Image (spheres, rainbow, N blue to C red):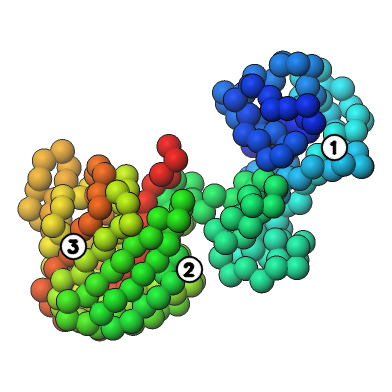
Amino acid sequence: MATSRPFSRYTNGPLSNNAEQRGNLYVGNENTLLDVGGVKWWNGPDEDLGYFIAYEDNQGAHNGRNSLDRTNDIPAFVGFKRSAEKTEASFIELVNNSFEQTFTTGLEAKAWLDANGYWSSFSGFGSSGFQWMTMTNISDRNASGIGQNNITVSITQSEGGMEIENGMYSATTFPEEYGVPLDGNQIRNTSSGVFTATFSQPVLNPLVAFASVGNPGLQVPVQSTLPFTPIFGQATTYQNPEGDGMYSMFTGQEGFNIIRIEGTVSSVSFTYDVTEYYCTICFGFVDQNI
């Protein structure tokens, strides 16, 4: 079954019907009242097939079927552009080709669309609602990144050993629904030490993904300063139970795992007791607008 949502173009607004607004463009949701003021609504594209951009069509060149009375072939004054695939890379390509831009991340492209009166279905979140921060700088002892709502993270490694990795190591090992980065700058850690992440503001349920912690002949324990809930794990065991399915330590033996630190968090640290070459790490969170 196709997934879609209703759209409207209304020039005498704003509409008081709980719809999201972009200039004269209105985007319906599950709380939107569609029968307010005789406004016509139009079903958008199938969102399962790709990410799309919605825009106001002042010429009325697009016809559609009214969402309320099912009337066909009425000028909709709403247009859409959809990516060839439902991937971040395809969405970036759509934006760059449509508007002569040179964005390298989906969040950058979406921010530009928002600022210029367009609406897009891209959110940066996988189907599980996870978003991974974009790393903007990585050096031996310090790194930084940015995520939704311009929330930033500052990362330190007490003993150094951080390097740049393109995407998470063997990212396809993680289930696709978690959206773990396949490319882009990510952190490679090559040393034991204390790894600390500090967010620019408190965030809800921060996430950390680890890839290739330890190897088949080497167990590497990682101790957290805060209790966490395992979300996904492979070749990973969990120690120091904290109750309600939470732990404060895990051990990897070529381990891949995602953990969620429950609650509102400003900073968290992880102690690596064993030097190895190497694991990769990325930070994220669930949707901060929920």
Give residue 262's position: percent from left, percent from top: 24, 44
Q: Is residue 20 above or below residue 240?
A: above
Image position of 36 (left or right of 134) = right
Give the Cα distance between marks 3 and 1. Answer: 52 Å
Q: Is residue 245 above or below residue 166?
A: above
Residue at far left of view: 240
Q: Amino acid at mark 3?
A: Ser
Residue 2 visible, this angle: no
Quadrant, the C terminus? top left
Between marks 3 and 2 in the image, the one whose residue lies nearer the viewer:
3
Give the Cα distance between marks 3 and 2. Answer: 25 Å
Q: Earlier in the sequence, mark 3 or mark 1?
A: 1
Secondary structure under the numbered disc 2 in the rendered image: loop
Quadrant, the N terminus? top right
Q: Which mark is residue 77?
A: 1
Q: Amino acid at mark 2?
A: Leu
Question: Pointer 2: residues within 10 angstroms few (<14), some, or many (20+)?
Answer: some
Image position of 286 (left or right of 73) = left
Corner quadrant of residue 251: bottom left
Give residue 162's position: percent from left, percent from top: 29, 80
> Which residue is identified by label 3?
269
Q: Which mark is residue 182?
A: 2
Q: Amino acid at mark 1?
A: Phe
Secondary structure under the numbered disc 3 in the rendered image: strand
Q: Is residue 173 above or below residue 142?
A: above
Q: Earlier in the sequence, mark 1 or mark 2?
A: 1
Q: Residue at x 75, y 68 (%)?
A: 100
Give the Cα distance between marks 1 and 2. Answer: 38 Å
Q: Which mark is residue 200?
A: none
Nearer to us in this view, 223 or 20: 20
